[in-house]
Structures are given as C-alpha cells and as structure tokens.
Amino acid sequence: MADKQVQVKSSTEISMGDISSDSLIKAVGKGLENVSNDDITIPRLAVVQAGSPQRKKKDEKYIEGAEEGHIFNTVSNKLYDVEGITVIPCGYRKSYVEWVPRESGGGLVAIHDMKPEGTTVDPKTKKAYLGENQIVDTAEHFVLIKNDESWEPAILTMTSSNLGVSRKWNTLLKMKKINIKGQMVEPPSFLYKFKLSTINAENDLGSWYKYKLEEVGQISSKEVFSQAETLSDSINQGKVKASEPVDTETNTDNDPVNNTTQPF
C-alpha cells in the first residue's frame, strides 16, 4: 500500500503530458553533461525603479507584473515576493563598474577590481568618471536565496544609497561573536539568515526604493550550511562567475538614487 502511494505521487509530480515518469528519470541530466561551473553564471538581484526598463512594455527587458520596489532575478526575470525573501550571506567583494551614460546610449563597458587610474569626481554630483564613462562603486554580496524548499545562489548588487545598507550589513556580520568550546570566535557569515525586502526612500530630487535587511535567525540544517560553505569557498577561490550587471543599476543625472549620499 505504501509503495503504491509513493509511486502515484511520484508520477503526478514529474510526468508531463504523454511523457512517463520512467522516461524522465532515465533522461535525468542529459543534454547538460558537458556543462561545467565555467559555463554557468550566478544571476544578480536588482530593484525595479520608476524609470527601469523592466516596467516599459515596449522595452526588450520588460517584465510583466513588475512594479516599483520589486526585487527581480536578472537572468530568469523572476519577481520575488514583495513581502521579502530569505537570504544567507556567503561572500562579499567590491567592484567598480564602468558604464556608458544612458543619455549617450548606455551599456556596460567593464567591471574593475580597483578604481581605474584617471578616475575623476564631479564636485557637484559626486559622480565618478573615467573620460565620459561613469564609474559606479558597487558592493556585491553573494547569497543563497530561499526558493520553496531549496536554496539558489545569487548576487545582491548594491550601489548609490544602498552602499550604506551594505556597510551596515558587513559591520553587523563582523561584530558577531559566538562561544565555541569556551572560545569567543567570529562565526561564518553564512550561519545567519536575513529577510531581504525594499523600502521607499526620498529626498528633494525624488523618491526611489532601496534594500532593507532584517536578521531572522541562524540556519540549523547541515545540508544548507554545507551548500553555503561550498559557495563561499568558490567565491574566495575565484571560481564563481557573475552575470553582468543590469542597466537598472545605472543612473542619469536626474535619478535621485545616484545623487543621494546617506549616512551609515
């Protein structure tokens, strides 16, 4: 009786149309045998803003249902729950992204590990430029995202006013101490879970959405801990490839996000 119930459930879950569950099981992984980690990129998370192409129906980057404040996956275009998603921080790095300004056509030029020599700062807007291109300080937080019963890797990209959120998050994690066998030690960042959502911010130039992070506890699953540790090791060993930043993270002179400097 028990075996029959399991068989029915399995058939219901994985059969598609006239394709039997047995056929699908025999074909597991086929077509992807030659795909290695070098052929995969980790998607980024980004926030839909008022002027984002993800909201413009005639734009190729349009996402149906996208509203201001939504967080979305830049590879799958998946929109996440507006109430927030659970993430585990697994690694961090700072980069300097070079963009062609939108008014000049826009587009990614390069991602630099260090701020390029010759970069200048406009004293009025505080924006950094290399020639005519804009250099954007970018904080990249590598995370695992809770997706139903599984966890998926992603990169939480923070620029402009979100850099203050990034600094606060890093500081909070660096301040953590736990007692292990009588010794106070710095725990791995991936011991902790956070709720990621967005909140509205505004100044004299306008309003926009930025990230909000709230600690929601520690992970207790050995399997999840191992997955997070593996991702962390891959980041430190330079084995992780990130997908390209999206243009919702670049800003024009009229964008309040890029003209805002907020305290820690």
Image (cartoon, rainbow, N blue to C red):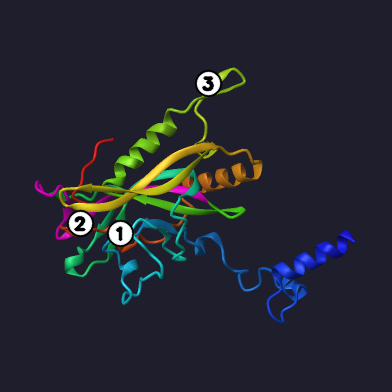
Residue at 21% in and 65% down: 102
Mark 1 or 3, which is nearer the eye?
1
Mark 3 or 2, which is nearer the eye?
2
Residue at 30% in and 44% down: 163
Residue at 66% in and 68% down: 29
Q: Quadrant of residue 68?
A: bottom left
Q: Relative to 111, does residue 22 appear above or below in the rendering? A: below
- In depth, the one of 38 and 223 nearer the eye is 223
Provide the residue span drawn in magenta.
122-145
Say which amino acid is labelled 3. Met
Q: Is residue 134 magenta?
A: yes
Q: CA distance from mark 3 to mark 2?
A: 45 Å
The image position of residue 48, as x and y in percent, is: 34, 60
Decide which of tag 3 and tag 2 comes sooner along the chain: 3
Q: Quadrant of residue 101?
A: bottom left
Q: Element at badge 3? A: strand
Say which amino acid is labelled 2. Asp
Give the residue at mark 2. Answer: 255
Give the residue at mark 1. Answer: 49
Give the residue at mark 3. Answer: 184
Decide which of tag 1 and tag 3 comes sooner along the chain: 1
Q: Quadrant of the N terminus?
A: bottom right
Task: Tell me if label 1 and label 2 are in contact, CB under 8 Å.
Answer: yes
Say which amino acid is labelled 1. Gln
Name the residue at the left extreme. 124
Graded by Cα atoms within 10 Å as few (under 14), some (14 to 19) or many (20 or more), the crowding at tag 1 reads many
Graded by Cα atoms within 10 Å as few (under 14), some (14 to 19) or many (20 or more), the crowding at tag 3 reads few
The image position of residue 149, as x and y in percent, is: 62, 53
The image position of residue 87, as x and y in percent, is: 49, 47
